[in-house]
Image: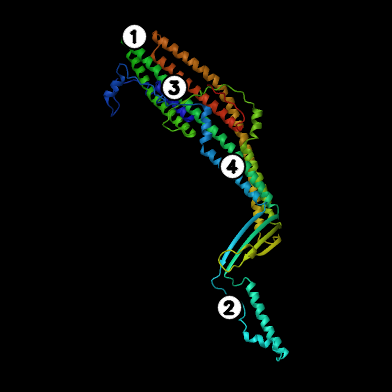
Amino acid sequence: MGRRQILLIAVWVLWSVGVPGTAQGQTGGRAGAAPPGGDPGVVVGLLSPGTPARRDPPRLAQSLEDTLSLTLEEAVIRGLRDSEEIAAARATLAQAEAQVTEATASALPQVSSRLVYNRAIKTIFDEAAAPPPVSDTLIPPAFDPNKPPEERFDLLSDLMIQDFMGALFRGLPFGRKNTYMATLTLAQPLYSGGKVGAALNVARHFRAAAEDQLEESEADMVLQVRGAYLNASLAQRLLRIAVDSRRVAEEHFLQVESFYQAGTASEFDLLRSRVDLENRDPVVIQAENGATLALLELKRLVNIPASQPVRLVTEVDPVLTEVNEDELKRLILERPALSAAQEGVAMRQEAVKIAKGDRLPSVAVLGTMGFQGFPDHALPPGFDAWRKDWSVALSLSVPIFDGFRTRGRVDQAQADLKIARLGESQLREALELQLEAALAEYRSVRAQIQARRQTVALAERTLELADARFASGLSTQLEVSDAALLLDQARVNEVQALYDYVQVLAQMERLSGGKMDLIAWGG
């Protein structure tokens, strides 16, 4: 329940006492006359002398056995523990931690392995695997001394070529039915234009910003829970004021009724006190509804079932506090929100370095250990049957022209950096303006609280005197109604001043990032 609802209840209080000249305060015309279209019997029953049916005060708890006693500290703890906003901020922090790990991996060696089995069904090497076999009839002539040397040489050459080609094709991987290939690859970047280090710095700044954001979310939740607890407590105080006001009106009506029966009070005084009493009921209902809604909002924030009865233990009775303005201004410059904005600027600066790194060469070391096996069956070959293929390479990559893509990335990164710096400056100015506004409001409401409390004491004394004068026959019912009006106004103004004072102190605690305790709560 905020300022608007408090003012609405105040209007109800002012309306209920029957100010002279208003529709409720006037009893001109025939007594018992019904409004157009109304029931005359209802109006006659309302305005006729007699004791009205008593209205029991509303109950805020259903049962003392299952009522939950909730202090402000317990409400804050429950809010921080069960808040979805806090859970989301913690998930963002976990995400930042993962990004730091990912960025660190870019600077470490990358090792990978691979194993492939290939079964050839039909290949182009099936027919060209080796020359056709040599006929056995050529071997004896190749050693016949009766043959000319040239002919014997040609025959031997053909035999040797065919044997060599057959052995060669048998050792090559072409056309093999079963092939196993295993590789182990190592890649270690030596230099990447500074992009790896910049990416790691970005991840670290993001983690720091996430930690600041988590702290901000927790401070926001504390402020929300405190505000909801304050609203619920003040709403219940307004309800007590409304109930007490009706009780006083009922006691006064009973007094006037006894005077009327004794002949010392007029019928006008009796009817006016009766109307004054009946006009208190809508105010009590409105206050009861406001207290219920404020308590439901508090239950929502601290994750309490709506059907669970709750009793607020911490009394909102703040003690006037002196605020160290210089210390508060210093703490504002250390706000987690401002630190998060500064981390955002640092991230954008590193992003510019990453974009510029695309213009620089990169150097890396590559190592590969390869193994191949060609068994005659589908099972893997033995350890000694694997053929080894190991190599080491030094890779140098130099960008020459990329269609101005790098230039566009650099311009975009620099624009993002400018936006981040402007955002930080705007946040700083906003915090300073919020501080000045909070301090001005603090000086105003602090001066009002003591005055409101004194006014309530004076109004209570005024009503006592008015009742005594009326009992002695020295005043009229109108004087008593005016005194009751003044007391209701004073009480509502006191509650409003307390609400404003605690709210501005909570706002200043929020501006300090929760590092300055300003609210002293009654117990």
**107 vs 245: above or below:** below
For marks 2 and 1, give the CA distance.
136 Å
User: Which numbered mark, 1 or 3, is in the foreground of this view?
Assistant: 3
- Marks 1 and 3, the one that precedes in the sequence: 3
Callout 3 secondary element: helix
Q: Quadrant of residue 319?
A: top right
Residue 187: mark = none
For marks 1 and 3, give the CA distance.
33 Å
Q: Residue at x 52, y 29 (%)?
A: 74
Q: Residue at x 55, y 19 (%)?
A: 450
Going by the numbered disc 1, the residue's amino acid type is: Thr
Residue annotated with mark 2: 127
In percent of width and height, residue 444 lies at 57, 25
- Marks 2 and 3, the one that precedes in the sequence: 2
For marks 4 and 2, give the CA distance.
65 Å
Q: Label 4 near label 1: C-beta < 8 Å?
A: no
- Marks 4 and 3, the one that precedes in the sequence: 4
**73 vs 189: above or below:** above
User: Which numbered mark, 4 or 2, is in the foreground of this view?
Assistant: 2
Is residue 251 rendered to the left or right of residue 507? left
Residue 93: mark = 4
Going by the numbered disc 4, the residue's amino acid type is: Leu
Crowding near the residue tagged with mark 1, few <14, some 14–19, many ≥20 C-alpha atoms within 10 Å: some
Of 56 and 388, nearer the camera is 388
Crowding near the residue tagged with mark 4, few <14, some 14–19, many ≥20 C-alpha atoms within 10 Å: many
Q: Quadrant of residue 157?
A: bottom right
For marks 1 and 4, give the CA distance.
78 Å
In percent of width and height, residue 126 lies at 57, 76
Residue annotated with mark 3: 240
Residue annotated with mark 1: 264
Crowding near the residue tagged with mark 3, few <14, some 14–19, many ≥20 C-alpha atoms within 10 Å: some
Going by the numbered disc 2, the residue's amino acid type is: Glu
